[in-house]
Image: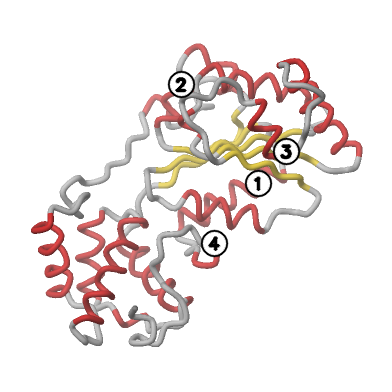
Amino acid sequence: MYKNYFHLTAMPFAMNPDPGFLYPSSQHAAALTMLEYAVESQAPFCLLTGEIGSGKTTLLRHFLRNLDKKITVGLISNTHRQFSSIHPWALSSFGIAPHDDSDIAQYEALIDYFVQEYAKGRRTLMVVDEAHNLTPTILEELRLLSNVNSECDLSLQVLLVGQPELRTKLAQPELEQFAQRVSVDFHLGPLTLEDARAYIGHRLTVAGGDPSLFHPESIAFIHARTAGVPRLINQLCDLALVYAFADQQGTITVQLLQHVLLDRKQRGAIPLFGERPVVQRVPAAAANLNSERG
């Protein structure tokens, strides 16, 4: 709708997690470095958490896109609390067909696949997105799968990506053995105001637009009303461009943003930006899984 009006080649604040738009904020860059280190150091388990809309999926897709070709990746992205076993989903993610549907056949098919890939000089990376939905039983299944690794040889690595609840879950006593195997972990928090300015400018530039389209005070307003959450920033910025196009305005002002929010409030749109501030909910006891379990 507004692309031609603002001379854009793409939608700068689209909601799909396009890795081409990834802005390497200080913490996103650090998270990416930690993921790369996890693969390079052959960490058996790696953990990436963040609040809803913090950019986990975009970061993950960027990371997977740039992985070494010698690493075989299986992505499980549709987790839910009704999972009865991780094995069928893992088999599907790698395109493996077991001899039959029994639990033993599924388990053996996975282990055989990991070993065969290792024999070819390849390592296998299993990525579980939305991993906070996994039950302790399913997480224990993942731990048992990792037993395919010996003291000297690592054929399977597991990357868990999810909301902060995942850290709370891993801090439970029954998952102590699992938590001890998490050697690399990172938590994504909200963007600072400085990063929000750079984030908005970066996305406009990638889309072929002018970074000065948003006034500095407008960006401060956006950051305050979205608590620095990238997904909410995208939503508000996208709406602002629609309203600017409708009013034939060339820049995004605070007054225009207030108009957007007022309309949302009058229509009862949910969530209304700023009404439910996002807080970082990483429990202190689970902030560093390895510090207390040495």
Indicate the amino acid at tag 4.
Pro
Which element carries disc 2, helix, strand or loop? loop
User: Which of marks 2 and 4 precedes in the sequence?
Assistant: 4
Q: Which of marks 4 and 3 is nearer the N terminus?
A: 4
Q: Nearer the viewer, residue 70 or 107?
A: 107
The local secondary structure at tag 4 comes to helix
Question: Which residue corresponds to the image point at 46% horizontal and 26% vertical from the top-left?
Answer: 81
Disc number for residue 171: 2
The quadrant in which the C terminus is found is top right
Residue 111 vs 27, above or below: the answer is: above
Q: Can residue 150 be seen in this view?
A: no
Whole-angstrom CA distance, mark 4 to mark 1, is 19 Å
Q: Residue 19 carries which label?
A: 4
Read off the residue under disc 1. Answer: 37
Of 188 and 21, nearer the camera is 21
Of callouts 1 and 2, the N-terminal one: 1
Q: Where residue 54 sits in the image (x, y, percent)?
A: 40, 50
What is the CA distance from the residue labelled 1 to the residue labelled 2? Answer: 23 Å
Amino acid type of the residue tagged 3 in the rendering:
Gln
Bin the neighbour count of mark 1 within 10 Å (Cα to Cα): few under 14, some 14-19, many 20 and up: some
Mark pair 4, 2: CA separation: 31 Å
- Between 143 and 133, the residue placed more toward the observer is 133
Q: Residue 141 carries which label?
A: none
